Amino acid sequence: MKKNNFAGDDNITLLAKGVLLKGEIHVEGTVRIDGRLDGEIQTKGQVIIGEDGLVEGKITAGTVVSSGRIKATVTATERVQLLKTAILIGEVHTPVLMMEEGAKIQGVTDMGVTVWSDELPKLPGSVRDLSAHRAKQVVVLEKESHG
């Protein structure tokens, strides 16, 4: 008897178009939503929401890629990518947020930035300080005309 490997990269859970699921999905691999989920998705892998997909509730994943509709709190440890037909209403917690032109988002984003330094970053030694060159005047020499 063959042993199931639920942690494999080829493990894909599909919620097909026209299917409504109320509840929770907890998996290790990829989840693709082309139907509707009212509830929670939790995976260390990837969540893909197709153009016809709709998720209301909570998404926790490594990566979220959407071209559908999300009304949820989304937490992704790697990135959230919203394709041109995507609409997201809710909260997004991720270090990287990518949006194609046409994607829409309404809500709160948290990319982990809590403070910034008041100092400007120092330029590498090979890059010259441009302010040192600002005080220099430019002299224009006229060409002699030979006539």
Image (cartoon, rainbow, N blue to C red):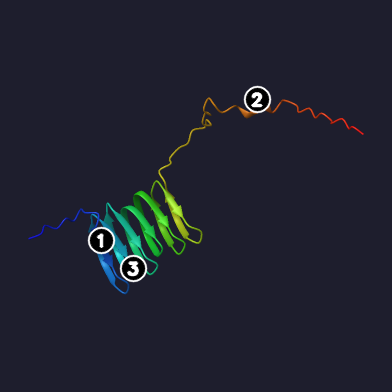
Q: Which residue is mark 2?
A: 132
Cβ atoms at labels 1 and 2 below 8 Å apart: no
Amino acid tagged 3: Asp
Q: Secondary structure at mark 1?
A: strand
Q: Closer to the N terminus: mark 2 or mark 3?
A: 3
Q: Which residue is mark 3?
A: 34
The answer to whether residue 46 is left or right of residue 125 is left
Amino acid tagged 2: Ala
Q: Residue furthest right?
A: 147
The picture quadrant where one finds residue 3 is bottom left
Q: Closer to the N terminus: mark 1 or mark 3?
A: 1
Q: Secondary structure at mark 3?
A: loop
Amino acid tagged 1: Ile
Q: Residue furthest bottom?
A: 18
The answer to which of 142 and 12 lies nearer the viewer is: 142
Q: Residue at x 39, y 62 (%)?
A: 71
Q: Residue at x 27, y 68 (%)?
A: 22
Question: Residue 76: image x %, image y %?
Answer: 34, 51
Q: Closer to the N terminus: mark 1 or mark 2?
A: 1
**In the depicted structure, whether residue 146 falls above or below residue 96:** above
What is the quadrant of the C terminus in the image?
A: top right
Q: Which residue is mark 1?
A: 12
The answer to which of 36 and 65 lies nearer the viewer is: 65
Question: Residue 88: image x %, image y %?
Answer: 42, 60
Measured Cα–Cα span from mark 1 to mark 3? 13 Å
